[in-house]
């Protein structure tokens, strides 16, 4: 075909040929770029696309319940309506903080800080508030469009009944912290996970925790969930049945209200812990929610140490309760017999040193039973001297004093039974006879924990077996299937003649029936016990209100067939009989009143103490 | 005017066909891309686009049959009219998305800057035809270049960085056709570089941000760089064969902003993968090279320049848009020819294709 038309200009035609070439090159480049993005890097971008759209979020498993020995609830869960925000989905931080703050009633700066804190993981939801009320939830739902990235979720929240029964024993849960996340033991945890932080909650966390589920949700660019794609149901944690007796626990907490110190009770035949009171206490519910830094520091720095688990962490001189050990040691060593009589003029002289009795004018002639009944110091000064420090230390250790009981959770204090070799080693001083004398009445450097004391009493009561105290009876699945069960664990049989323990028990019975412990008498049950007063040394140094002595009371009952052993210490409360005795009595009453027809209390005479 | 038999036989069915296919693909993509949207406005967008498509095709046919020499005659008044409309926008234009780009004509809103592209092409074609004896001479370039700066200035003020840049590039490519030399181009580049601080200061904050985001997308992945990143994810995740119409989550779940306008090519890439993109780009390639062929075979300088200018416009829009979507150019709002939602843009390209066909039809007509 010839060219019937006139070409405009050869210049234009030539330029157009160049242009076609250029266009071809441009298209080739675009296709190359497409090939690169879609074929070479396609997998990578497909993954990104999926993670954009699909978010895996974990569904927290409800923790198992914690029940008392008869199935009464101590810890349960309740639904908490929480509000979260996905930092990546917040277009304008200040605007969002203002909008969210208005709804939640929080300061915008606070919200900005929370969202900023989540910047490192922009797609991980940040918790803004917990336990929203219905009104706030409705407002958030209504304003969903104005609140990009904000979502509501229901989560099981740990709930401790009555503000936390036996809080220090049960423990608490909180978000796993930064230090823990670095530990090997916590390698399965992710930030935001809840973990037991103290007590049984921590010790048996792997049982109670359950297995978190997850759900895969599709979200839009604003982080709003569009639909649920897949879900793995979480598996609830196992429930724990404790040896604790809620009824006794409540009685003890009520009786101990306003005091500082501990009440511990256990079954002397098995070592099962029945009561565990530590005061002052904290409300574990506060940890289950997010505890503010200030609130945490306030707790940690509280001079009354509410976080301290006193029954096993606080150490006190045992005071006259230690006379039970001295008595056993002296009898076993043959240093005294029930017939041995010492005169108590109100003081005891050793060389140039005078050791006083607590009773002005003294007790006069005392045999062993009278001495323990009246808690005569002078008798026990001499009994200790005659038995010798080695015998006393030996028996104290037989009963487990100066060692951890092995209860198995938390940092248990060891206490201290000072011996000549210990004194030489640690203080670089030799042991004086005067040291032995004051050891005879539980003073000096001896330190015990309330848990050790109750273990001691239990061993006396049961005929000489030291049991490891234990608190979890069994672990149960939701179906009631027993996953794990625990039982008594005898640590040792105390190396004492049965007759010796028999005499100690008789002495304790007389303490309550006619001696310093009359306040603990209850009608229908024979109670055996011992009072004690732990001197607070350097009184002035402790500041006002802390100069009073610590009051001890230990007891077991019934005398014939002991079912409960108890140790009470009331810090800075004065004499043992008056301050600690009534608490022990209240617990014993609660324990035996159902068995007794009327459950009335034999009103003890006005307490004379010690 | 008479209807010659040759008008029908020379009507370029291939160009018209490709245009029709592209419009249809655009409507399909707008429809499917908004399936996941909860907004009824977005769900109904495709219906509006069907209407615009129909109007566009009518425009194409009309532009193909009215003798283009008429345009040559009225090139200057048309250019003046459009400049006036830009002024109207400047004064009264409807404000949308923080920019004044639209004016209301009855129930429609039109964007004069889109039509300015055609007016500028016609203006330049007429200007150079009048001086065809001097084609290739540098002094021929200065005046039209200065004139072209006027609409560019108004469009920048709207502000519409993309269209302004397009008008500039369009002018440059037409100057290239009539003899702009490399050394002149280099001079312009240097002049441009010298003017950069001034131009930069004319940009709005978000425009500056976009350019920064293009240069350093990792600086602010959730802010200005977000569009580029999400677009690349959409395109890349389409892989070889695409996710299909309904499973293209990236665009449906609003991760991709403006998925129906500036980022429609990304939606397409996610839905149809490399193979789909290849087909679309080949169609565009045929359309453009065919148009260029017609330009080189035009019977007069005006026809050649006009056809070339229109094809340059299509090519430049495609390059800037696809370059932006593929993360190799800054994010400036330039629609993909025929695919993107938007009546003015669609209509302008349809009219342009019609005019190119017109040039072909009339190459035998004397």
Image (cartoon, rainbow, N blue to C red):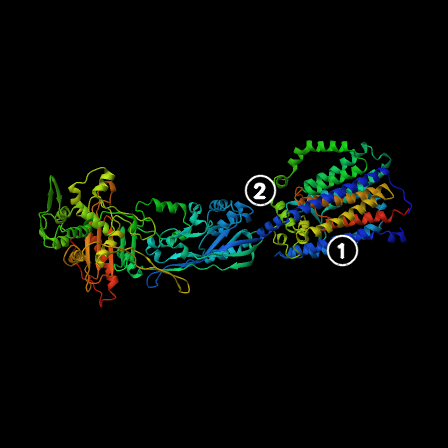
Answer left or right for B56 relative to A329: right
Task: Pick whichever, B68 or A542, lies toward us.
Answer: A542
Question: Please, which chain is the residue tagged with disc 2 on?
Answer: B
Q: Residues within 10 Å of mark 2 (few under 14, many from 20)?
A: few
Q: Are marks 2 and 1 in contact (CB under 8 Å)?
A: no
Query: Percent from the top left, x then y, of residue B179?
Result: 81, 35
Front: mark 2 or 1: 2
Residue ID at (21%, 58%): A463
**Upstream in sequence: badge 2 or badge 1:** 1
Residue assigned mark 2: B220
Answer left or right for A16 relative to B271: right
- The answer to whether residue B55 is visible is yes
Q: Is residue A487 above or below residue A438?
A: below
Task: Pick whichever, B39 or A605, lies toward us.
Answer: A605
Residue assigned mark 1: B54
Query: Percent from the top left, x then y, of residue B15?
Result: 80, 51
Q: Secondary structure at mark 1?
A: helix
């Amino acid at each position: 075909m010839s060219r019937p038309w006139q070409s405009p200009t050869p210049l234009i035609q030539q330029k157009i040929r160049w242009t076609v070439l250029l266009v071809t090159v441009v298209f080739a480049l675009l296709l190359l770029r497409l090939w690169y993005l879609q074929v070479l890097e396609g997998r990578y971008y497909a993954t990104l696309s999926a993670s954009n759209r699909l978010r895996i979020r974990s569904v927290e498993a409800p923790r198992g319940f914690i029940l008392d020995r008869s199935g009464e609830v101590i810890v349960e869960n309740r639904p908490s309506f929480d509000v979260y925000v996905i930092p990546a989905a917040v277009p304008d931080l200040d605007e969002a903080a203002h909008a969210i703050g208005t709804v939640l009633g929080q300061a915008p700066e606070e919200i900005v800080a929370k969202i900023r804190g989540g910047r490192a993981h922009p797609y991980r939801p940040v918790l803004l508030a917990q336990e929203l009320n219905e009104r706030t939830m409705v407002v958030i739902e209504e304003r969903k469009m104005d609140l990009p990235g904000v979502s509501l979720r229901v989560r099981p929240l740990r709930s401790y009944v009555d503000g936390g029964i036996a809080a220090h024993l049960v423990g608490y849960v909180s978000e796993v912290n930064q230090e823990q996340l670095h530990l090997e033991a916590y390698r399965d945890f992710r930030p935001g996970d809840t973990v037991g932080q103290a007590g049984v909650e921590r010790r048996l966390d792997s049982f109670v925790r359950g297995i978190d589920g997850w759900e895969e949700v599709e979200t839009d660019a604003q982080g709003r969930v569009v639909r649920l794609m897949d879900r793995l149901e979480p598996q609830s944690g196992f429930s724990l049945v404790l040896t604790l007796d809620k009824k006794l626990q409540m009685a003890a907490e009520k009786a101990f209200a306003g005091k500082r110190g501990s009440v511990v009770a256990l079954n002397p035949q098995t070592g099962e812990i029945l009561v565990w009171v530590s005061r002052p206490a904290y409300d574990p519910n506060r940890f289950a929610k997010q505890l503010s830094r200030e609130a945490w520091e306030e707790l940690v720095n509280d001079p009354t140490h509410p976080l301290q688990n006193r029954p096993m962490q606080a150490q006190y001189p045992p005071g006259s309760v230690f006379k039970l050990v001295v008595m056993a040691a002296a009898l076993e060593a043959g240093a005294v017999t029930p017939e041995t009589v010492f005169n108590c003029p109100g003081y005891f002289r050793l060389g140039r040193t005078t050791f006083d009795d607590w009773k002005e004018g003294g007790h006069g002639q005392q045999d062993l039973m009278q001495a323990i009944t009246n808690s005569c110091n002078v008798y026990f000064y001499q009994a200790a001297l005659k038995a010798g420090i080695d015998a006393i230390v030996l028996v104290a250790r037989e009963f487990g004093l100066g060692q951890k009981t092995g209860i198995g959770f938390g940092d248990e204090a060891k206490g201290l039974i000072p011996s000549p070799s210990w004194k030489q080693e640690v203080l670089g001083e030799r042991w004086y006879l005067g040291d032995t004398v004051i050891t005879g009445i539980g003073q000096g450097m001896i330190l015990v924990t309330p848990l050790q004391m109750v273990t001691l009493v239990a061993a006396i009561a049961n005929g000489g077996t030291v049991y490891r105290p234990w608190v979890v009876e069994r672990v149960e699945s939701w179906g009631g299937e027993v996953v794990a069960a625990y039982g008594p664990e005898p640590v040792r049989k105390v190396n004492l003649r049965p007759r010796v323990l028999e005499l100690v028990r008789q002495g304790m019975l007389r303490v309550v029936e006619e001696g310093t412990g009359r306040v603990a008498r209850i009608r229908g049950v024979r109670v055996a016990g011992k009072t004690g007063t732990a001197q607070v040394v350097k009184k002035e140094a402790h500041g006002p209100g802390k100069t009073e002595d610590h009051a001890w009371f230990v007891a077991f009952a019934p005398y014939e067939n002991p079912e409960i052993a108890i140790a009470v210490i009331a810090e800075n409360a004065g004499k043992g009989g008056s301050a600690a005795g009534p608490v022990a009595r209240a617990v014993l009453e609660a324990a035996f009143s159902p068995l007794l027809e009327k459950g009335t209390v034999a009103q003890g005479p006005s307490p004379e103490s010690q | 005017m008479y209807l010659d038999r040759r008008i029908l036989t020379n009507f370029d069915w291939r160009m018209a066909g490709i245009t029709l296919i592209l419009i249809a693909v655009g409507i399909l993509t707008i429809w499917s891309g908004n399936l996941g949207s909860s907004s009824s406005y977005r769900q109904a967008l495709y219906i509006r686009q069907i209407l615009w498509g129909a109007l566009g095709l009518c425009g194409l046919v009309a532009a193909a049959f009215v003798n283009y020499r008429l345009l040559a005659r009225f090139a200057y008044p048309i250019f003046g009219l459009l400049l006036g409309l830009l002024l109207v926008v400047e004064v009264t234009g409807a404000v949308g998305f923080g920019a004044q780009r639209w004016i209301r004509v009855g129930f429609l809103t039109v964007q004069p800057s889109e039509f300015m592209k055609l007016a500028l092409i016609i203006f330049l074609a007429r200007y150079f035809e009048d001086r065809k004896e001097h084609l290739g001479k540098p002094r021929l370039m200065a005046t039209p270049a200065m004139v072209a700066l006027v609409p560019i200035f108004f469009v920048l003020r709207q502000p519409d960085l993309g269209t302004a840049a397009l008008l500039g590039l369009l002018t440059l490519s037409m100057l290239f056709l009539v003899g702009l030399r490399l050394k002149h181009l280099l001079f312009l580049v240097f002049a441009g570089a010298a003017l950069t601080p001034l131009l930069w200061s004319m940009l709005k904050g978000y425009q500056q941000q976009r350019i920064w985001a293009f240069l350093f997308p990792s600086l602010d992945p959730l802010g200005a760089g977000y569009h580029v990143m999400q677009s690349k994810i959409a395109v890349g995740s389409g892989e070889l064969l695409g996710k299909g119409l309904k499973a293209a989550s990236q665009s449906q779940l609003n991760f991709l902003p403006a998925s129906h306008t500036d980022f429609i090519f990304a939606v397409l890439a996610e839905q149809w993968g490399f193979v789909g993109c290849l087909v679309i780009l080949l169609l565009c390639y045929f359309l453009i090279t065919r148009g260029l062929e017609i330009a080189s075979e035009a019977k007069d300088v005006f026809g050649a320049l006009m056809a070339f200018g229109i094809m340059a416009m299509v090519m430049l829009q495609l390059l800037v848009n696809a370059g932006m979507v593929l993360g190799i150019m800054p994010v400036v709002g330039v629609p993909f020819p025929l695919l993107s939602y938007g009546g003015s843009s669609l209509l302008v390209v349809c009219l342009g294709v019609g005019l190119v066909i017109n040039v072909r039809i009339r190459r035998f007509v004397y």
